[in-house]
Amino acid sequence: MSEVTDAPVRTSTAQRPLQGSNVWYELMTTDPDAAKAFYGSVVGWTIGDPIPGGGQDYRMIGRSDGGFAGGVLGLTDEMCEGGAFPLWIGYIGVDDVDATVAGIEAKGGKIQMAPFDIPQGRIAMVADPQGNPFYVMKPVPPEGQPDAQSDVFSATAEQRVGWNELTTPDPDAAREFYGDLFGWTSDDFMPMGELGEYRFLAHAGTTIGAVCKPMPGGSNRWRYYIRVPSISAAIDAVKAGGGTVSVGPHEVPGGDHIVIGNDPHGAEFALVGKA
């Protein structure tokens, strides 16, 4: 999230621990206007205009139900020269940003942006020991809503991230790292032959995603699956909008189908939905 963002994180009424929850998702892109058109067609989101007042191009991603799905950060030439590139990145909620950052360093992770404050809370950009980046954040609840919680993640609702998948060469180390820091459990799994196990990640009793080794030729990264009503319709929109599909559609347990691809400016995305 950006220092210029003044809109609150949309909330749900279900109470769950903040530590380890999925509180925000952000697209970093070199062309926010193109992203607005692309993801509007593919997912059905409404991406707003830049929020004024802070010197950055930051936009809110609106859902059809009036809530927010995340944000879009426009990457400047200076950011790209410093190593930034188009990608989706997630924010993990924590009770104490500074203490969590210290724990990340102690466990072999890296600090990419030291803790700092924004109107919506305190955040830091970090990476796990295998180099996968993410943010940690302690949000400030909206005024008058002290118990408010983010609802950007949902296992079933459309236009929200419904699955968080980490591919890493060392899933056992990742399970220990994220489990110790965020309380995620990974007791259940699905065998994947030579690739080992597809370990399901759970937070406070809710399955939020999985960790596994990369497929042959695959990459080491966090991947966020956005739920759409129709995978076939989404594929048509991806191609019409100048994006590409690199994996799928594949059916997954439960009857859903998934695809993985890249938007017109190179950010990898993933979709889940009915065929």
Image (tube, helix red, strand yellow):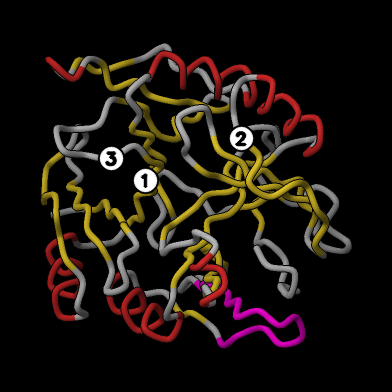
Q: Quadrant of residue 48?
A: bottom right
**Which of the two discs, 3 and 1, sits closer to the camera?**
3
Residue 83 percent location from the top left of the image: 49, 59
Give residue 196's mark: none
**Which of the two discs, 2 and 1, sits closer to the camera?**
2
For badge 3, the amino acid type reads: Ser
- Secondary element under disc 3, as helix, strand or loop, is loop
Residue 17 percent location from the top left of the image: 70, 32
Q: Which residue is mark 3?
A: 219
- Distance (Cα) linking label 3 and label 1: 10 Å
Mark 2 and mark 1 lie on one chain; the one further toward the N terminus is: 2
Q: Of 101 and 231, which appears nearest the observer?
A: 101
Residue 248 percent location from the top left of the image: 11, 50
Q: Of 139 and 173, which appears nearest the observer?
A: 173
Q: Which residue is mark 2?
A: 110
Q: Residue at x 62, y 19 (%)?
A: 107
Looking at this view, name the residue that lies furthest to the front: 81
Query: Is residue 196 left or right of 10 when viewed as pictured?
Result: left
Looking at this view, name the residue that lies furthest to the right: 144
- Secondary element under disc 2, as helix, strand or loop, is strand
For residue 110, above or below residue 183: below
Give residue 223's mark: 1
Mark 2 and mark 3 lie on one chain; the one further toward the N terminus is: 2
For badge 1, the amino acid type reads: Arg
